[in-house]
Amino acid sequence: MKRFEDKVVIITGAAGGIGKEIARKLAGEGAKLALVDLNEGALHEVMTELELPEDKTLLVKADVSKEADVKNYVEQTLVKFGKIDGFANNAGVEGPAKPLEELTEQDFDFVYSINVKGAFFGIKYVLPVMKQQKQGSIVNTASVAGLIGSPNMLLYNSSKHALMGINKVAAIEAAPFNVRVNTVNPGVINTQMMRHIEEKVAPGASEVARAAYNDAVPLKRYGEPEEVANVVAFLLSDESSYVSSSSYTVDGALYNV
Ligand SMILES: NC(=O)c1ccc[n+]([C@@H]2O[C@H](COP(=O)([O-])OP(=O)(O)OC[C@H]3O[C@@H](n4cnc5c(N)ncnc54)[C@H](O)[C@@H]3O)[C@@H](O)[C@H]2O)c1
């Protein structure tokens, strides 16, 4: 029996590096998927690349920072599949890399509207469905940046710290209904987000930033998005049935340094 046979899972940020690998992993184990992203064209490319069947796949263009969009992707999932077993609350942005005194209100609102408000809205609309079902698993993609401070990354780091707090409260409210809530905390992972960060921290010399990140990781390499997806799949599956309010670093021991 595949772990996700007859299971319905929503993935936000599904057109991005980590989201796509979560989709690949879960689809391979039988899941029906609602793939959500701002980038509709890229969602279609994911569906084609992963050869996802129409009857087991729903694509929804949504801006997770807009409450109406979030309500809509949850409603559309229920219309097509009738339930929600898992929720990979994964969409996020890195925002600017600058000293804190140079950050603007617009910078603040941009990062927090997606990484904090967007993640909150997702839980706000998915959790009642899972509570009614008396089962479900939510995995919030936080970051090692939600556990430590990094220079010039105030908005990203603090927004992921906020998500850690949301995770703790949601896990306690969800527990009486047999719903589990956890975070995965990736370190430096090979996706377009890290390409953007490398360019922002070392404009025109991103290979220097890349080498420095590689060196900083005790395992001496970036993680691959499928290595994050493996842990997300575990947390979404029944194998983690006694795991809630936990945080799983997937970081090559970076947090320990
Ligand atoms: N790559 C890393 O090193 C790393 C490390 C730690 C945590 N993370 C977290 O993992 C998650 C996925 O990151 P990734 O590396 O796959 O990045 P990515 O840039 O490849 O993917 C992010 C996806 O989110 C989507 N998105 C952005 N804003 C959105 C919005 N308002 N509404 C809906 N979708 C939106 C983008 O279109 C993109 O497809 C993020 O939450 C990120 O913070 C990434």
Image: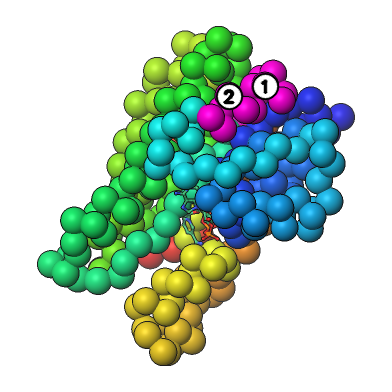
Residue 66, percent from left and from top: 40, 38
Q: Is residue 77 magenta?
A: yes
Mark number, residue 75: 2
Image: magenta residue range: 72-86
Q: What residue sits 62% from the left and 35% below the top?
A: 10
**On screen, 100 above or below 52?**
below
Residue 156, percent from left and from top: 33, 57
Q: Is residue 247 magenta?
A: no
Q: Is residue 135 visible?
A: yes
Q: What residue sits 49% from the left and 48% below the top?
A: 91
| Residue linked to disc 1 | 79
Amino acid at pointer 2: Glu
Residue 64, percent from left and from top: 45, 42
Q: Nearer the viewer, residue 216 or 58?
A: 58
- Left or right: 137 with respect to 93? right
Q: What residue sits 60% from the left and 12% below the top?
A: 133
Residue neighbourhood size for the residue with mark 2, other residues' Cα within 10 Å, grouped as few (<14), some (14–19), many (≥20): some
